[in-house]
Amino acid sequence: MPDAYLVPMSSPDLSQAERDAVQAVLNTPNLSIGPQVQAFEEFVAERIGVQHAVAVNSGTSGLHACVRALGIEDGDRVITTPFSFVASANILLYERAVPVFVDVDPETGNIDADLVAEAAAGLMKGGRAAERWLPRRGVPDARRLKALLPVDVFGQPADFDALTPTAQEHGLPILEDSCEALGAEYKGLPAGRLGDVGVFGFYPNKQITTGEGGLVVTDRGDVADMVRALRNQGRAPGDTWLEHTYLGYNYRLDEMSAALGLAQMRRFDELLGKRERVAEWYAEGLASLPQVETLPMAPTTTRVSWFVYVVRLAPSVDRAGVIRALDEQGIPARPYFAPIHLQKYFVDQFGYQPGDFPVTEDLGRRSLALPFSGVMTREQVDLVCERLAGVLAG
Ligand SMILES: *Cc1c(COP(=O)(O)O)cnc(C)c1O
């Protein structure tokens, strides 16, 4: 690996406004549980069009708090996708719930809603009809299907019009992992409010950053109250500092992070617009490369919120060789995602095997994330495209 890449893999997009906002907090004695968190929550709630927003210290902690708030427990089953960042399934394991994976749409990489409908019907029926969908081992008997957990992959919302009837038929809440999709729209509706509760993540490579951070959005007051309690050491509304109604966590976002997030949200249209422009440059630069397919857009995606720039290589291309050659030329590139069901501890606990989810595995083998951020210049995008073209020409 060269000492420094010519182009970073990702980069936050920060202005003087963010620096001033963080500095202003540092000039107060109030570094946690204060007005910045509340202002950040109100700003995002307004923007997304939800009644409640609860800021937390990571996307993962937000998702975990939602699992608790939805009452998902030991042995409960939740239908979700193996083509995602590992956190979206880990949060079920934290509560010893069972992720029931179904495969994804080969175009978007989002969970296949027809398979979700079949799996839900099978799991509700039980017996042999359920077994077909369950992992080979590590599954307690006679537990219930409790929820659906779709992920809006790469900034494109899952197909909620196809998922919602399944949820309604079986009375299941939908937890939307929108950690990659702040600002995306599905048929004109903002990602994050497409299910019962949605979660955003603000790690530095996301559309906006707070350093580490996340945010839960919902119209359900009971879920918002519970997430607020859980993030704050289990203190229910009315509890004093040393009263803890629930087993809680410290999942609070601090005031510096919230101030950063609020300043980023005030620039949100600018930030998304810059990412869109970079994605357009890539699409132009890659159009002449027959071995490279850019991300197909679902007709339901009325706005994609570019998170990463992931392309798919033709099956004949040696991806590891491409990554190595680009690396030697100062260009970072990464596989994205590694299928969750084939991570060691998922294999150990549930007995998953290669071949279980062929579409996920195919996308996992062929996907390549290229350097991406809103601060990339046209010259940098062109450089990546030229080097990739050179490597592919061999
Ligand atoms: C980024 C991300 C998360 C949350 O990540 P944190 O680093 O905990 O904020 C969760 N799910 C998906 C799909 C993500 O991409």
Image (cartoon, rainbow, N blue to C red):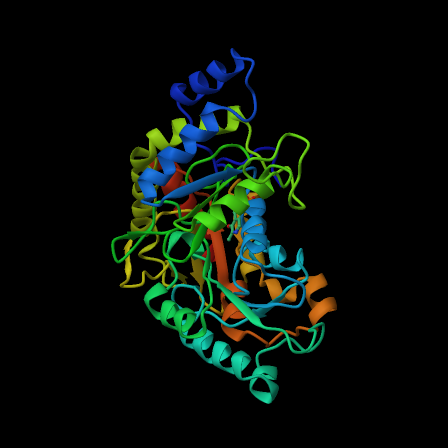
What x and y, as percent, mark residue 81?
52, 65
- Name the residue rendered at 64%, 29% in the picture: 241
What x and y, as percent, mark residue 273?
29, 39
- Judged left or right of residue 270, residue 260 is right
- Name the residue rendered at 35%, 45% in the picture: 50
- Judged left or right of residue 354, residue 392 is left
Identify whether 234 is placed above or below 175.
above
Residue 376 picture quarter: top left
Residue 42 picture quarter: top left
Identify whether 44 is placed above or below 153.
above
Most foreground residue, 274 or 113? 113
Residue positioned most to the right: 348
What x and y, as percent, mark residue 285?
33, 49
- Name the residue rendered at 42%, 23% in the picture: 18
- Judged left or right of residue 336, residue 263 is left
Identify whether 294 is placed above or below 376.
below
Is any atom of residue 236 visible in this view?
yes
Is any atom of residue 179 visible in this view?
no
Residue positioned most to the bottom: 128
What x and y, as percent, mark residue 204?
50, 36
From the image, which quarter does the N terminus lie in?
A: top right
Most foreground residue, 127 or 152? 127
